[in-house]
Image (tube, grey):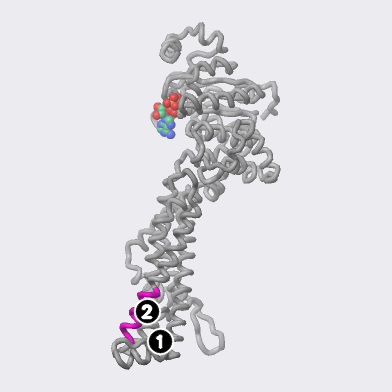
Amino acid sequence: MAEWTPDQPLVSIRDVHKSFGELEVLKGVSLDVRKGEVICIIGPSGSGKSTLIRCINALNDIQAGSILVEGIEVHDPDLDKLELRKKVGMVFQQYNLFPHKTALENIMMAPIKVLKEDPEEVKKRARALLKKVRLEGKEDAYPGELSGGQQQRVAIARSLAMRPDVMLFDEVTAALDPETVKEVLITIKDLAEDGMTCILVTHEMGFAREVADHIYFTDRGVIVEHGPPATFFKKAKDPRTREFLSQIL
Amino acid sequence: MEDFFRQLAAEAPRWNFIFFYDERSWNRIVEGLYYTLILSVACVILSVVIGVVGAWAQGSPSRLLRNIVQGYIQFFRNTPPFVQLLFFYFALGQFTPTYSPDGWLQVPIISNVGWAIISLSFFAGAFNVEIFRAGIEAVPDSTREAAEALGFSRMQTYTEIVFPLAFRVSLPALNNNLVNLIKTTTQAFAIAVPELLYQCVTIWNDYPSAQYPTMLLLFVVYIGLVGILVFGMHKWERALRIPGYGV
Ligand SMILES: Nc1ncnc2c1ncn2[C@@H]1O[C@H](COP(=O)(O)OP(=O)(O)OP(=O)(O)O)[C@@H](O)[C@H]1O
Ligand SMILES: [Mg+2]
């Protein structure tokens, strides 16, 4: 396998097919994400957005096609999953923090247990990350004592603590109330501006327009249309895209 | 004090608290208490270990391992613990190797106390597997997935995330089962383990007038023993309580 170099796409998805039993959810999806790029995936419910990004870090397997992350074939049966997961961070809709650990411990756990890094050094980094997601002073709070938006920002910090090269966000604001949506979006925007490569599934069109370099519209397991936000939102050609946008905007 | 009970025995012949003034009886009670404590502590620990390992094995990808655990649970849950005890001691006990400490006597390497501990632990362990499994099932898949996405191995996910959460959910049910286990240790009486019930029966066979007092003693001791366990478990439950979390 050829060595990956930064001028190649960081994530390269080629003709991916994925079925759950009889149900074909992804019917040949291809897309590339370059280093530092932010892409947004939008589309109606059930169109396979979550499935697609879960395939990128091997939470789902695929039946055909290929997904390369920095040259690693994600669906190689001999894949070293740990190598992949060091590169790919993921944030979920339901935060999924570890409820028995404080905010700081949630962030520190994986670097200490998985990467076997020095706990003191990790602690410093974890504090810095909490500051970065604007949660100073919440170090010792348990997830159950934080609001949804605060939990989601801890989840983002927890993922960042592993120093991933690409971050996956699956509708991370969908479970939040409107006021807290903004604080999470600001956190993600900060990240994007720092140069983090991000793949986002979102229903926040205003946000997608503002931060995305490229927008993909999926429907029933295929990418119907894609383009940079300026052209995507104004000059969508496909009737399905138009209908979706007219409903949501 | 001794005089008081001597006096009482003389005046009320059914209330002969012989163990309070007769040294031999007192020593029997002490020995009985000792073995009851050994049985209780050993069975509690071993049965919890069996529960943890069994629940982990039930989530294993190996079908064979899962079936073995399932068979174990079915057998120990669906047959009387008393019969299990007799089976372990009389049937399996025959096949255990013996050793000879003095060149004369042949002593089995597993004593009756050993068999009682093994049999009762496996009995209670079967329930503990189910109890922990219910706890594990209460941990959302999404929490497990989050750990997986962070690079935790299956083992790490279990020990760091799933088990600590499952354990908290399991504590009340575990508490009940351990209370039952402690009470069930009296069945070791049947294979002549010199625990408290055994000693009490010996005493009242020798002194029928001491029957009510020894029964009373049994009740008091078990109320105390179970009380200590329940108190400790509740304290533990409170210590493990997570602020802002359901359990
Ligand atoms: N584990 C699974 N087993 C079976 N079917 C599944 C599974 N996960 C998803 N599906 C199905 O796959 C299809 C795509 O689901 P997916 O979650 O990817 O959609 P989505 O685009 O993320 O939708 P939403 O916007 O509602 O989150 C759906 O029809 C769903 O029912
Ligand atoms: Mg989804």
Q: Residue at x 44, y 67 (%)?
A: B228
Residue B119, above or below A120: below
Which residue is nearer to you in this view: A95 or A51? A95
The amino acid marked with disc number 1 is Phe
Which chain does the numbered disc 2 sit on?
B
Up the image or down, B22 lies above or below A55; here it is below
B214 in magenta: yes
Secondary element type, mark 1: helix
Residue depicted at x 53% and y 42% = A142
Give the residue at x 43% y 51%.
B169
Q: Give the SS element for disc 2.
A: helix
Of the 4 image quadrants, the one containing the N terminus of chain B is: bottom left
Residue in front for this viewpoint, B209 or B99: B209
For residue B217, the mark is: 2
Residue A83 visible within the image = yes
Q: Dot 1 corresponds to which residue?
A: B19
* Rendering quarter of residue A73: top right
The stretch of residues the image draws in magenta is B210-221
Mark 1 vs 2, N-terminal side: 1
Callout 2 amino acid = Leu
**Can residue A25 be seen?**
no
Question: Mark 1 near ligand 1 (CB under 8 Å)?
Answer: no
Q: Residue at x 63, y 36 (%)?
A: A161
Residue at mark 1: chain? B
Instruction: Locate residue B116 relative to residue A98 in the image: left or right.
Output: left
Name the spot of residue B43 as percent of width and height, x first.
45, 68
The percent coordinates of residue B104 (x first, y second) are: 53, 90
x, y percent for residue B20? 41, 86
